[in-house]
Every structure is written in C-alpha cells, then in structure tokens.
C-alpha cells in the first residue's frame, strides 16, 4: 500500500510540475527547468553519500574497532542477501542513525555514539534492519526523483514570480493576472514540498515493516523508536533540515502549541507513536 501511495504521489508531483510549467512558459519552460533540476539532483545522487557523511563528521569503523556494531550489520546484510555496507560512527550524544548510498553496492550505515550507549543489542539490531531496508528498497533513488521534481517546480515558481513582477513570460496572448500567478506558483511550490514530505513518511513506514520482517519481530524496533524519540527531544542534533529525512527519527526539535501543530505539516517522519503501534500490531515472523 505504501509503495502504491508513493507512486501516486510521484505522479502528483509530475502533474504539478507540468501545470506550473504551462502557466509560465508552456512545455519549453517546463522542460528547461526540469533539465536544470535533473542535473543538480543527479550530482546530489552520485555524491550525496560522501557529502552527508562529511557534514556529520562520520568516521568509518572496522570490525576490530566496533565488533558488535559491525557484526550486527554483517549478519543483517547476509540475511537480506545484500552486499556488506560501509559502517560509520557519528560523534555526538543524540541517539540516531541513517543509511545513505545510491545502491546496495554503494551503501553506508551511520550511527551516532549516543545510539550505541542508549540501545540494547536487539534494539540496535532492529534499527540497523530498518536502515538496511531503506537500502534494499532504494529509497535514496526515490527521494532523489522526488527532489528532482520538487526542485524543478521551485525553479519554475521563481521564474514565474519574476515574470509576473516584470511583465515577462508567455507570449501567446493568454498571460494570467500577475497577482494570481504569484499566488498560484507559491501555493504550487508549497504543495509540492508537502507531497515530497508525504513520500518520505511513506518510505519510513515501509522501512519499519521491512526491518521488522528482517529480524522476525517488530518489538525491538518499536522500543528503539520510543527511546530515540525521547533522546531527540532531550538532545536535538545540530542537524541540517535538508538532511533530516535521512535519519530514523527526526533529529530536529519539534514545536509546541500552535507552532507544533503547524510543524506537523512539515514532518519528514510519521508520528513515532503511530510507527510503534503498527510495529506492535502485526506478527512479523519470517
């Protein structure tokens, strides 16, 4: 169901892209903006793993340096029938983890020092199974496709806004009202971002399910998510919001009151309580 939802959301993003392109410059404008966004995101897709690992000062570890962590990743990779990913440790007390890499053969799993101190062995195993599920589902590719389309929509929206201000744009005699064009493109860009976040949330549910199936039990991952959520609230990471969707739980502090309600629209992750409930409501025996 989540895979089907992801497909529909990607189609919706594409439809928004075509629509905004038609508002501004017809098919040619959409194709130009899409091409630019595609190049930018292709570079990000090929090099993002190194960039994000460097951003968080992650260091590679060997089996001798981190025998339990390395051994768990190796066992899970073998069970999932995928190549052994590189293993990294991120300095810092906040418990969290993420996976990156453009394919199973070019994957890396990174965990914080905090997660190694907070979680029990079976809970850490559940977290690592979740991250390997992201790798197996090629979620990095899906995220890159979504980011490409959203990036193109953003470029088109900015072009349309400037054209409305300076009276440029379509020359077919059917130019829309500048104020309407400004409002429509702003709403389109916001809507595209919300769709992208919805895709991210769908992939988290799918990775939870894949991780639970891999270990044959959803309870260890459920307990781990509860601990990680508390840890993220108590010790938010100094994380770049653009990479927040990569972590198993959001590394950013959530707001409270009206700000918290507004922030829910921009969640990169489903509510942890809902993820825990799903993990505990099904049998996951392999």
Image (cartoon, rainbow, N blue to C red):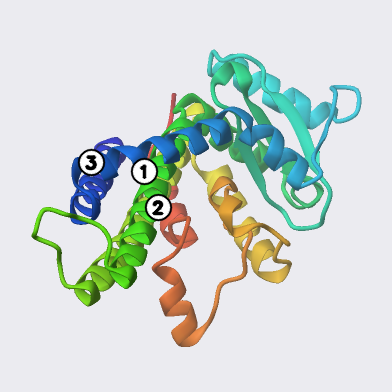
Secondary element under disc 1, as helix, strand or loop, is: helix
Q: Tag 1 or tag 2, which sits nearer the N-term?
A: 1
- Picture quadrant of residue 239: bottom right
Q: Which residue is mark 1?
A: 33
Say few, some or many: other residues with alpha carbon within 10 Å of mark 1 (under 14 / 14 to 19 / 20 or more). many
**Which quadrant holds the C terminus?**
top left
Residue matched to label 3: 11
Considering the numbered disc 2 on the image, is that residue within a helix, a strand or a loop?
helix
Can you tell which of label 3 and label 2 is closer to the viewer? 2
Measured from the top left, where is residue 103 in percent x and y?
Answer: 54, 22
Q: Are marks 3 and 2 in contact (CB under 8 Å)?
A: no
Residue 230 vertical placement versus 142 (above, below): below
Is disc 3 placed on a helix, strand or loop? Answer: helix
Left or right: residue 261 versus residue 122 is left
The tag earlier along the polypeptide, 3 or 1, is: 3
Classify residue 40 as left or right of residue 38.
Answer: right
The residue positioned 68% from the left and 42% from the top of the image is 52
Q: Residue at x 75, y 58 (%)?
A: 94
| Residue found at x 33% / y 55% | 192
Report whether residue 27 is seen: yes
Q: Nearer the viewer's eye, disc 3 or disc 1?
A: 1
Task: Decide which of tag 3 and tag 2 comes sooner along the chain.
Answer: 3
* Residue 27 x %, y %: 20, 41
Q: Quadrant of residue 194?
A: bottom left
- The residue nearer to you, when weighing 190 against 23, is 23
Residue 2 spot, x, y in % from top left: 30, 41
The answer to whether marks 2 and 1 mark residues whose Cβ atoms lie closer than 8 Å is yes
* Number of the label disc, if any, that sits on residue 155: 2
- Left/right placement of residue 131 relative to residue 124 reads left
Q: Which mark is residue 131?
A: none
């Amino acid at each position: 169901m989540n895979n089907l939802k992801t497909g529909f959301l990607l189609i919706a993003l594409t439809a928004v892209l075509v629509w905004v392109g038609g508002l501004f410059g017809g098919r040619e404008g959409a194709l130009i903006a899409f091409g630019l966004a595609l190049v930018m995101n292709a570079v990000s897709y090929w090099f993002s793993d190194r960039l994000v690992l460097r951003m968080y000062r992650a260091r590679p570890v060997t089996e001798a340096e981190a025998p339990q962590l390395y051994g768990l990743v190796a066992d899970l990779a073998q069970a999932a029938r995928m190549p052994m990913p590189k293993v990294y440790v991120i300095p810092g007390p906040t418990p969290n983890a993420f996976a990156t890499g453009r394919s199973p053969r070019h994957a890396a799993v990174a965990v914080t020092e905090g997660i190694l101190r907070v979680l029990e062995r079976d809970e850490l195993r559940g977290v690592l199974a979740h991250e390997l599920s992201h790798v197996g589902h090629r979620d990095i590719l899906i995220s890159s496709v979504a980011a490409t389309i959203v990036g193109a929509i953003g470029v088109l929206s900015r072009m349309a806004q400037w054209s409305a201000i300076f009276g440029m744009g379509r020359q077919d005699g059917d130019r829309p009202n500048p104020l309407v064009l400004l409002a429509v493109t702003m709403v389109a860009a916001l809507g595209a971002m919300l769709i992208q976040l919805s895709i991210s949330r769908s992939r988290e549910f799918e990775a939870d399910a894949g991780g639970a199936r891999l270990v044959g039990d959803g309870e260890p991952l459920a307990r781990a998510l509860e601990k990680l959520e508390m840890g993220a609230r108590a010790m938010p990471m100094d994380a770049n919001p653009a990479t927040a969707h990569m972590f198993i739980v959001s590394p950013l502090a959530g707001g409270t009151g009206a700000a918290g309600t507004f922030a829910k629209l921009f969640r990169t992750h489903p509510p942890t309580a809902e993820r825990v409930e799903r993990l505990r409501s099904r049998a996951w025996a392999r």
